[in-house]
Image (cartoon, helix red, strand yellow):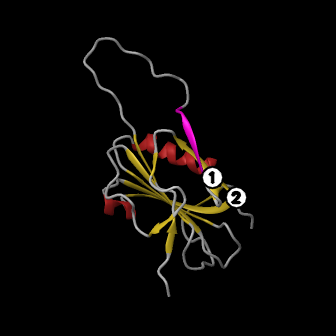
């Protein structure tokens, strides 16, 4: 049996803040951050324009594509292959792209192996059971975890699946 192949849209973001010693200060702009759209034949989503794509929907060997997210960074991966499942398992019930999903957020988690502080793991039913689930994993590294979580939430909220059940 061949080893599974991960279909991935792999992203990393570095959120930076400037520090200075000057006496002048300015309020942060009220404009939302600039976004970009990723899309392939399976899904599309929007993400921060500052995020860098490591793969544009091509298949890669399973495993994390980076050794460690940069400080303040997020590594988001999509996996659309795996063994057939008959359920979504544990987690908070949610929806992604109009599909039933389960979400688990943990301190450390699987992403601890690459130096991240937080793992968001979402299993999405994109086809009738029994079938492979679509898996989303985000590895978040501090500082700025709250802002990184908001970026992940926005990405998931914007996700649309192109294939129909």
Query: On residue 132, which mark appears?
Result: none
Q: Quadrant of the C terminus?
A: bottom right
Please say if 126 is above or below 40. Answer: below
> Can you give x and y, in whole percent of width and height, for residue 39 in the image?
61, 52
Please say if 90 is above or below 45. Answer: below
Judge by depth and name the residue closer to the eye, 23 or 47.
Answer: 47
Count the labels in the image: 2
Which residue in the rendered view is the most extreme toward the bottom?
1
Instruction: Tell me the quarter of the picture where residue 122 sits.
Output: bottom right
Which residues make up the magenta segment?
A: 33-39
> Can you give x and y, in whole percent of width and height, for residue 1 in the image?
50, 88
Q: Residue at position x 32%, y 55% from top?
A: 68
Counting residues from the start of the chain, the first of labels 1 and 2 encountered is 1
Mark 1 residue crowding within 10 angstroms, few (<14) / some (14–19) / many (20+): some
Give the secondary structure at mark 1.
strand
Which residue in the rendered view is the most extreme toward the left?
21
Judge by depth and name the residue closer to the eye, 101 or 165.
Answer: 165
Q: Residue at position x 66%, y 79% from top?
A: 130
Q: Tell me, yes or no, whether the two marked residues, 1 and 2, touch with CB atoms within 8 Å.
A: yes
Q: Residue at position x 39%, y 63% from top?
A: 64
| 85 in the magenta segment | no
Which residue in the rendered view is the most extreme toward the right?
164
| Residue marked by disc 2 | 162
Please say if 51 is above or below 42. Answer: above
Q: Residue at position x 36%, y 49% from top?
A: 141
| Residue marked by disc 1 | 44
The chief SS type of the magenta part is: strand
Judge by depth and name the residue closer to the eye, 46 or 93.
Answer: 46
């Amino acid at each position: 049996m061949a080893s599974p192949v991960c279909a991935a849209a792999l992203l990393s973001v570095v959120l930076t803040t400037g520090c200075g010693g000057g006496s002048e200060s300015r309020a942060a702009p009220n404009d939302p951050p600039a976004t970009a759209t990723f899309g392939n034949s399976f899904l599309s989503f929007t993400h921060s324009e500052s995020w860098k794509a490591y793969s544009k929907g091509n298949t890669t060997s399973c495993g994390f594509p980076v050794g460690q997210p940069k400080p303040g960074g997020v590594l988001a991966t999509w996996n659309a292959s795996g063994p057939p499942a008959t359920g979504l398992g544990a987690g908070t019930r949610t929806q992604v792209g109009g599909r039933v999903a389960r979400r688990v957020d943990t301190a450390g988690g699987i992403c601890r192996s690459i130096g991240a502080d937080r793992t968001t793991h979402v299993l999405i039913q994109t086809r009738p059971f029994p079938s492979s689930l679509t898996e989303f994993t985000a590895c978040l590294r501090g500082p700025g975890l709250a802002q990184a979580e908001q970026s992940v939430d926005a990405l998931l909220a914007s996700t649309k699946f192109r294939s129909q059940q």
